[in-house]
Amino acid sequence: MSDAQPLQRLLDQRSDLWRGRRRPRSRTAASGSAELDAWLPDGGWPRGHLIELLPTCLGSGELDLLVPLLAEQTRQGQPILLIAPPLVPCPQRLHRAGIALDRLIVVRTPDQALWAAEQSLKSGVCGSVLVWHPRGRVDARSIRRLQLAARDSDAPAFVCYRPNQQPPPSLSALRLGLAPGPQLTLLRGDGPPRTLHLGRANVIELAARRRRSTLPP
Amino acid sequence: MSGPARASLWAGLYCPGLPLSAVWDPQPGIGPVAVHSHQRGQARIFQAGRIALQHGVRAGMSLSQALALLPQLQTRPRNPTMEQRALEQIALAAYGHSHQVVLAPPDTVLLEIAGSQRLRGGLQPLLQQLQETLVAQGFRVRCGTAVVAAAARLLARVNQHADSPESLQRTLDALPIEALGLAPNQEQAMTGCGLHRLGELARMGAPERARRFGAGLNAELDQLYGRQPTPLAGWQPPERYLQRLELPVPSDRSEALLFAGNRALDHLGSWLEVRDRALTALHITLEREDAGNPIALGLSLARPGFDRARLLEMLSLKLDRIRLPAAIAALVLKADTTLEHRPPQADLWDGRNRGDAWPALLDRLRARLGEQALNGIAPQADHRPELAWRWVSPGTTRPCAETRPRPTWLLPEPRPCRRADFRLEDGPERIEAGWWDGQDCRRDYWIARDSRNRRVWIFHEHEPRSGWFLHGLFS
């Protein structure tokens, strides 16, 4: 038993080793929802780590999930980057959610999206970096590079795969499946596999102004 | 303009290797080099580099003789245009130390330093600093100082200093006749008369001197000894920066272009410094050897300033992006500048320059991805949702007055869809607009669910088309 102690200590020093039990909590950024914070293994979005999002289809809530975090960061004056989003983010919606649009940068070219994300993370000045993986095969090496770059920065780094893409075996801290709802599934991270059906914040917002209407044929 | 009456002091910067430095870059491992010129219909070595000299190549040798001696010798013809440009580059460095700079072609630059020597802590530190700056740019210069500009030019060749009229007289008198650099036949005539020192020549009566050696010599001596003022035309750095830099050898390798770019940035840096301006954009045109369409590259800086390392990095990113269709013969640099000059600020606590990191990141991304790749997104006052947003340059802010629910994602163009695929949940929001600009439309927007349970934004259009369209995803 005494021989196991130094090994234990060695393992504890490695933050890149995934272990079946709770590791020391990493620094986190609040997700903006108490429900989500409680559900996430670290109690928020882990900073300095790569977080993988796997939506089942386009528009499963991948951006809405992060809007509160992005809003908070732009309020603090930190720039945020959306790299190669598949559609156009609606400025009115983002503005209403509290995002300062002058701190939001959209990189529109899908080629070299991962390079751009890597550079942004390395610069250490960005609040959050959110990159949509370009179409096609996922290159495990570029994800690995992204992960190393994320470690240099204080920002949570998100990579969002296409619905038909298979993420590579990686050492990411957190991998979340996303289904419309939004419904989250913990695919990788500390703790047992679990799902969360998030509160419908914007449905409520709509319900407040719902009015009687006749449906057209 | 100058004379002994005014307490002025002139420094001469004499660059003996100018013809060589003008056409050859002092890059390490270049091998033996030389410059040749055509004399009496025959190509002869004009100036040889250090390694070539060690192997016995001498100025005046015919080209074939030199090549027989040293087969690996590389030689280029003399280029007066490039020599003039190199001289101006030296003048630019000198302009950082004096407001009064004069070109004395072919190989000397004069600057007035009476005022600035105290600023730099004395004459020697000033000259040393100047020499170091120039060596970094690839020019080895000899310095000389004198109270008279014409004498400073002469003393620079022999590396002597005369900071008072008396010492000038003494120094000049002791110089050998050859230092004047006269024509060989004139020199021979003087030695034939038993004249070996400048002093002996100066003591000779003026009419006799004119009769024996020509009238021009008298005027020259008068200027040297400060009895007549030297006519001088002041040199000013150009108002706008435009520089053409020929590559030593046309090349399509980006390393060669970067090397030339590095040298050009040296020059640009000193120009910005003496003009006290900050760079906002650099336009580089690559001229092709085959005279095809030149290739234009633009580097724009998110924040005015001059950071050589960053500019070089941006240039290399730009060059990585393009495929050079032919060898490049020359670079033309044009700089956009501003007077607004903000020195970089470092963070008080960790010393990291965070204020600079953000523009640096934007510049790097732009250089690789293209100018159009980086955008902010801004709302636009229009009722038609497809016209209610636009791409803007990063950091732009605009007011937003929309209070109706909008989806997170918009499709770039509304896409036709079938009503049967959706379950309507909320609506309609009637939008009728555009009658004033010919893009008239009448639509009812609905929030609906699709078969995958996504909340989507669809509309039923009445005019101009009729049908259902998908326009956004609430995600």
Image (cartoon, helix red, strand yellow):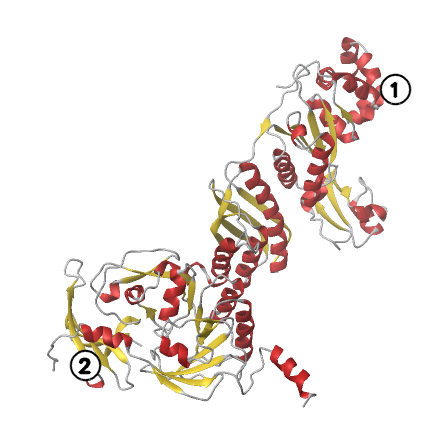
Please state the chain letter of the residue tagged with numbered disc 2 in the rendered image: B
Q: Position of residue A127 (x, y in %)?
A: 45, 64
Q: Badge 1: how crowded within 10 Å, few (<14), some, or many (20+)?
A: few
User: In terms of depth relative to the viewer, which is nearer, B392 or B345?
Assistant: B345
Residue at numbered disc 2: B424
Q: Mark 2 touching mark 1, by CB under 8 A?
A: no
Q: Earlier in the sequence, mark 2 or mark 1?
A: 1
Which quarter shows the C terminus of chain B?
A: bottom left
Q: Farthest residue toward the front?
A: A2
Q: Total of numbered circles in the picture?
A: 2
Q: Is residue B142 above or below residue B247?
A: above
Q: Position of residue A148 (x, y in %)?
A: 56, 72
Disc ID at residue B192? 1
Q: Position of residue A99 (x, y in %)?
A: 34, 64
Horizontal side, residue B6 vs residue B429: left or right: right
* Label 2 residue SS: strand
Q: Is residue B221 above or below residue B299?
A: above
What kind of residue is marked 1? Gly
User: In terms of depth relative to the viewer, which is nearer, A193 or B262?
Assistant: A193
Q: Position of residue B462 (x, y in %)?
A: 13, 72
What kind of residue is marked 2? Leu
Q: Residue at x 81, y 54 (%)?
A: B71
Q: Residue at x 81, y 48 (%)?
A: B52
* Label 1 residue SS: helix
Which quarter shows the N terminus of chain B?
A: top right
Disc ID at residue A13? none
